[in-house]
């Protein structure tokens, strides 16, 4: 949970930071961590823009949306599912 908060609230996030999630994805089976491994390909648009002459390393609003939405939705979904399974086991 702490790593998730640090990653999403960090002012600067590099594509390599997502490789740190691999051990957590295996250990926790969190859906958000799996989905962000697909959305991280958004970062490949930045070097492409550089070849076109745009030297800005800033993602557009829509690119940020597609980068972070899978992580946040999958993380919330996994936490909700875990909570539901724990409540179902108690009954």
Image (spheres, rainbow, N blue to C red):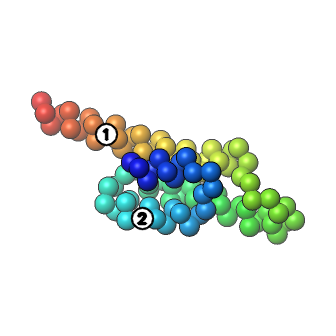
What is the secondary structure assignment of the residue under circle 2? helix
Image coords of residue 83 (percent x, y): 27, 37
CB within 8 Å, label 1 to label 2: no
Residue 30 visible (yes or no):
yes
List the single residue furthest toward the left: 91
Q: Is residue 42 above or below residue 16?
A: above
User: In the image shown, does 13 or 45 lie closer to the viewer?
Assistant: 13
Circle 2 residue: 22
Image coords of residue 2 (percent x, y): 41, 50
Image coords of residue 42 (percent x, y): 64, 57
Q: CA distance from mark 1 to mark 2?
A: 21 Å
Q: Label 1: how many residues lie within 10 Å, few (<14), some (14-19) or many (20+)?
A: few
Circle 1 residue: 81
Placement of the C terminus among the 4 image quadrants: top left
What is the secondary structure assignment of the residue under circle 1? helix
Q: Residue at x 82, y 63 (%)?
A: 55
Q: Residue at x 65, y 61 (%)?
A: 43
Query: Which badge, 1 or 2, is on the more N-terminal residue?
Result: 2
Mark 1 vs mark 2, foreground winner is 2
Image coords of residue 11 (percent x, y): 62, 51
């Amino acid at each position: 949970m702490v790593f998730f908060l640090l990653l999403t609230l960090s002012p600067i996030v590099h594509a390599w930071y997502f490789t740190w999630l691999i051990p957590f994805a295996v250990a926790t089976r969190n859906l958000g961590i799996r989905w962000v491994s697909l959305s991280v390909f958004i970062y490949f648009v930045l070097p492409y823009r550089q070849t076109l002459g745009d030297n800005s390393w800033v993602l557009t609003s829509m690119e940020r949306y597609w980068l972070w939405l899978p992580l946040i939705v999958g993380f919330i979904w996994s936490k909700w599912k875990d909570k539901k399974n724990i409540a179902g086991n108690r009954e």
